[in-house]
Amino acid sequence: MAVPHLALVPQDGTLQSLSEKSGPERREVEAALRPHYTIIDLLGGGGMSRVYLARERGLDRLVAVKVLLPELRDRREDRERFRREARVLAALRHPGIMPVFTLGEAAGIPFFAMPYIPGPCLARRLASGGRFTEREACAILADLADAVAASHRAGVVHRDIKPENVLLENGRPILADFGIATLHSSDQSRSEMTRAFGTIGCMAPEQLLGHVESDERSDIYSIGVLAFHLLTGRPPFAGSAVREVAAQHIARPAPRVSVFRPGVSLLLDDLILRCMAKDPAARWPSAASLRDAVLDVAAHGDARTAGTWRSKLSRLRRRSRTVRKWD
């Protein structure tokens, strides 16, 4: 079966090689979940989990089922982190954040089920279609920033915003994979912020340096990196080694989008550059302020649809006052 969507794109190999490695693991999962789900295909995987396309027997619907990797199932902290991701997702009620249907355990395998989104992730779209138009990029960035703002209001910092973790549903971004998110209300989560979690190519300098004070503004940096990639078709920093890329994020000023895409709106160029400021205090103070700025830039640059952009801003602001907070 051809599957157009990867919930998590492997970082060190193709989906085919991942499938080959996970044969016995998949058979174990199929047997454990058989009373409730029929496993159809492997959607993807990361360093902590696998995500399978499945059909839920009771409601006869397609779902994405995330399961903890075998080598992590005996470690209490990893099992708790996995369950915490599901609880965070279930509590963050926002149309731009992946919801959770159910959390459970079968034959010792922790799992949770989510909607199956048949659209591509941003990484797949970037790999196949290159750059986005300014209009497309602004629409994605505004919706993504609104979702992140809802997460931040609930005290949740995602810490791994990247193209692989943003799914597209009819062009609308859905933020997924809160597996390494931190809760500001949790002392344990705060201490974990010093650990080298995340994806090097999208991490803020303070994350790479292991600073405990990394916070919501680290997510804003990652949104800036993603925005740069949307408009130029490439990340702001590149290199042949992970250490080289990390060093550039830490020490080298971020390039302007216009260096790689001449003619881009100066306002949008400045907005993205501010996201990627080395000093967190120089970035947008909140994801909500970034969202408002994106929509203001879009309205300024597209006079024909300025009213539409401003209506969207008003709608998002109203919605932000009704999103339930994580407690």
Image (tube, rainbow, N blue to C red):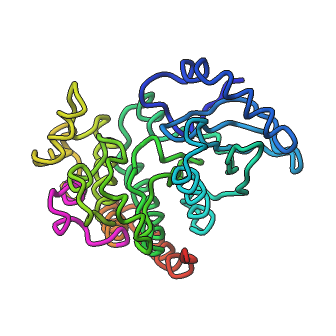
For residue 271, above or below residue 162: below
Residue 92 location (% of width, % of height): 57, 68
- In the rendered structure, does residue 287 fall within the stretch colored magenta? yes
Residue 267 location (% of width, % of height): 21, 59
Characterize the magenta stretch by its predominant secondary structure: helix
Left-right relation of 8 to 22 = left
Quarter of the rendering occupied by the N terminus: top right
Residue 245 location (% of width, % of height): 21, 36
In-front residue for pair 143/327: 327
Q: Which residue corresponds to the image point at 29% horizontal and 53% vertical from the top-left?
A: 224
Extreme left residue here? 252
For residue 322, above or below residue 253: below
Quarter of the rendering occupied by the C terminus: bottom right
Q: Which residue corresponds to the image point at 27% horizontal and 38% vertical from the top-left?
A: 235
Is residue 173 among the parts visible in the rendering?
no
Total marks shown come to: 0
Left-right relation of 136 to 28 = left
Is residue 221 among the parts visible in the rendering?
yes
In-front residue for pair 192/273: 192
- In the rendered structure, does residue 311 fall within the stretch colored magenta? no
In-front residue for pair 248/197: 197
In-front residue for pair 300/32: 32
For residue 54, above or below residue 207: above
Residue 138 location (% of width, % of height): 38, 55
Query: Which quadrant of the view contains residue 294?
Result: bottom left
Q: Which residue corresponds to the image point at 25% horizontal and 32% vertical from the top-left?
A: 242
For residue 37, above or below residue 242: below
Looking at the rendering, the stretch of residues picked out in magenta corresponds to 269-288
Q: Which residue corresponds to the image point at 52% horizontal and 38% vertical from the top-left?
A: 8
